Amino acid sequence: TPLKQQREDLTSFQVIAHRGASGHAPESTLAAYELAHRWGVDYLELDAQLSADGEVVLFHDDTLERTSDGEGHIHDYTLAELKTLDTGTWFHEAHPERTEEEYRGAQILTLDELFDHFGHTTRYYIETKSPDLNPGLEEALVERLEAYDMIEQGRVLVQSFDQESLLKVRTANPHVPLIQLLWYSPSEQDSATLTEWNDTTPGADSIRDEDFERIAEYAVGIGTNAAYRGHEVIDADFVRQAQTHGLSVHVYTINGQDEMKRLMALGVDGLFTDYPDRLLELVSE
Ligand code: G3P
Ligand code: CA
């Protein structure tokens, strides 16, 4: 079955460059992806959204202010308008100690531009971001994946916090391996655990097996946070339990080597990091 093959492709530990090497260069820019690619990561992580004229673009926030010189919602602008923005200078100003002059003036990337640049020489870990604000994103994304032969070549994972969004991707093409993102917050009273993927998620101590079972019906793995309100929430039992259900466990977003080591010792299957150089150093030890 496709799910079985997809799981077999994911058995080794995965180094996932979160928005590129975004600790070193402005997130989601070609410079950040080039660094990560040069260092030999397994996956380039990216957040996909739609411009007003339906182009798939790489941008994390729903609004432009934090990481560009634009303002307002990204979805309100055409690609031509988005291309006039500078997504590098903010990093220069925020992190003068670890920037390069050349990062100024970086442009928002389209998914096609990223694929044209790196082709099949890497893998892509693509998040369908804010599905409610990006209607049609899943279909547009799958069309681009097919156009660049990314699915058959095993070059892609699609991730989302939104279960419905993942199921739309599966409907568009059942061969895309899917990762269910979770915001695991076991101490929350109202949204006890494994929130954001299903409104009917039950309480913290009783749910894990059936939740994992349901996720395993459509996904090859989960992407989860490691800590919540300063407490570690991922332990060896959690990891083993997910893996018992056939799910890979990837954890976001881990930047310190001590925490990387802790999670690797728990047997997680991959880490998202802004500093892939730090993780690659540990992997090669
Ligand atoms: O995709 C994993 C992680 O990136 C999810 O959080 O907000 O960084 O997209 P965020
Ligand atoms: Ca993401």
Image (spheres, rainbow, N blue to C red):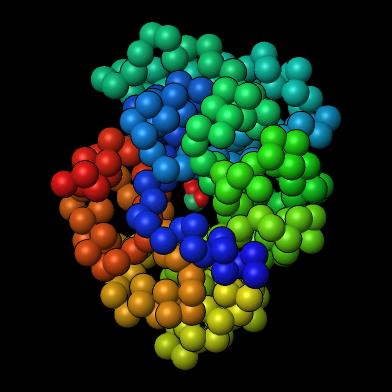
Q: Quadrant of the N terminus?
A: bottom right
In the picture, residue 2 is in which quadrant? bottom right
Q: Pick out the residue farthest to the bottom.
A: 206
Looking at the image, residue 70 lies above or below residue 200 = above
x%, y% of residue 30?
51, 23
Q: Position of residue 245 (x, y in %)?
A: 48, 79
Camera sees residue 75: no
| Placement of 10 over or under 29, stated as above or below | below
Instruction: Tell which of 123 and 258 is nearer to you.
Output: 123
Expressed as whole percent of the image width and height from the top left, the position of residue 220 reads 55, 65
Residue at image position (57%, 44%) is: 155
Q: Is residue 279 visible?
A: yes
Work out whether residue 280 or residue 134 is closer to the camera in this orientation and state it: 280
What residue is drawn where x is 34% and y is 63%? 268
Residue shown at 33%/31% (left/top)? Answer: 39
Position of residue 223 in the picture relative to residue 132 (left or right):
left
On screen, residue 130 versus residue 239, left or right, reads: right
Give the residue at the far top of this rendering: 101
Q: Can you give x and y, in whole percent of width and height, for residue 90 in the image?
A: 46, 21
Quadrant in which residue 23 is drawn: top left
The number of numbered discs placed on residues in the rendered structure image is 0
Residue at the image point whose x is 61% and y is 67% from the top = 3
